[in-house]
Image (spheres, rainbow, N blue to C red):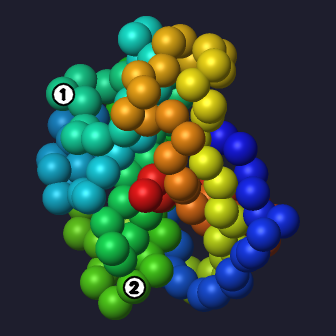
Amino acid sequence: MTDTSHTSTTTATGILHAHGRITWRHLATALHDTDGTAWADYDGFHIGAAPTSPPPYTHLWAWTADWLLRARLDGDAAIVGVLQTGTTTPQLPHPGPPAATEPITYTIRHAHTWPANENRVGPLNPTITDRPADLYHTHGTHPITFVRIR
C-alpha cells in the first residue's frame, strides 16, 4: 500500500483484544459479520467477502464500523488480535474470552491500495487498485497494524 500519512494522521485510544490462536473455522464464522476483508492468495490480492478456506499467505485483515481484526494465518489456525475503536465489543465465536484485553493508543495513517501496475502479489483486479485505506498502527513495545479499506 502507498502511505499518504504526510497529509494527515489521527491519534486515538481503543481496546486491544488479544485472542491468541484460534481455528480457521471459528475465525471464518466471525468474518461473516464484518464489513469487509482483505487478503492475498495465488490469484492476487482480494478485498471483499471472506474467503471460504484459509488463504495460503500470512495475513488477513477484516473490519466493521467498531473494530478491526488482524489474523496471522498458519494453516487451519490463526493468531488473532482485534482493535476495538467504537462502542461495540467484538464477539468472536471461539471458546473462552480473549487471552488479554488492554487499553491502547493508536495512530491512523491514510494510504491507498497498490496502483494497477503493481504486481508483487500477483495480478491486481481493477476493483481493488488505488482504493483509499486507513492503517491503524498501535503504539507500544509490540506495535501491530490493522487495516480498513474504504
Left or right: where does residue 15 sit relative to residue 8?
left
Q: Residue at 50% of width from left, 47% of height from top?
A: 131
| C-alpha span from label 1 to label 2 | 27 Å
Q: Residue at 45% of width from left, 53% of height from top?
A: 149
Residue 128, position in %: x, y? 43, 35
Check disc 2 and give the amino acid type. Answer: Gly
Left or right: where does residue 12 sit relative to residue 70?
right
Residue 27, position in %: x, y? 26, 45
Q: Quarter-wise, where is residue 126 in the image?
A: top left
Q: Quickly name the residue at label 2.
A: 86
- Dots 1, 2 in contact, CB < 8 A: no
Check disc 1 and report its element: helix, strand or loop.
Answer: loop
Q: Label 2: how many residues lie within 10 Å, few (<14), some (14-19) or many (20+)?
A: some
* Camera-nearest residue between 37 and 97: 37
Left or right: where does residue 33 sit relative to residue 41?
left
* Camera-nearest residue between 81 and 40: 40
Check disc 2 and report its element: helix, strand or loop.
Answer: loop
Q: Residue at 25% of width from left, 57% of height from top?
A: 34
Q: Quickly name the residue at label 1.
A: 52
Earlier sequence position, callout 1 versus callout 2: 1
- Residue 17 seen in the figure: no
Check disc 1 and give the amino acid type. Answer: Thr
**Is residue 70 positioned above or below 122 on the image?**
below
Residue 98, position in %: x, y? 38, 67
Left or right: where does residue 46 sit relative to residue 133?
left
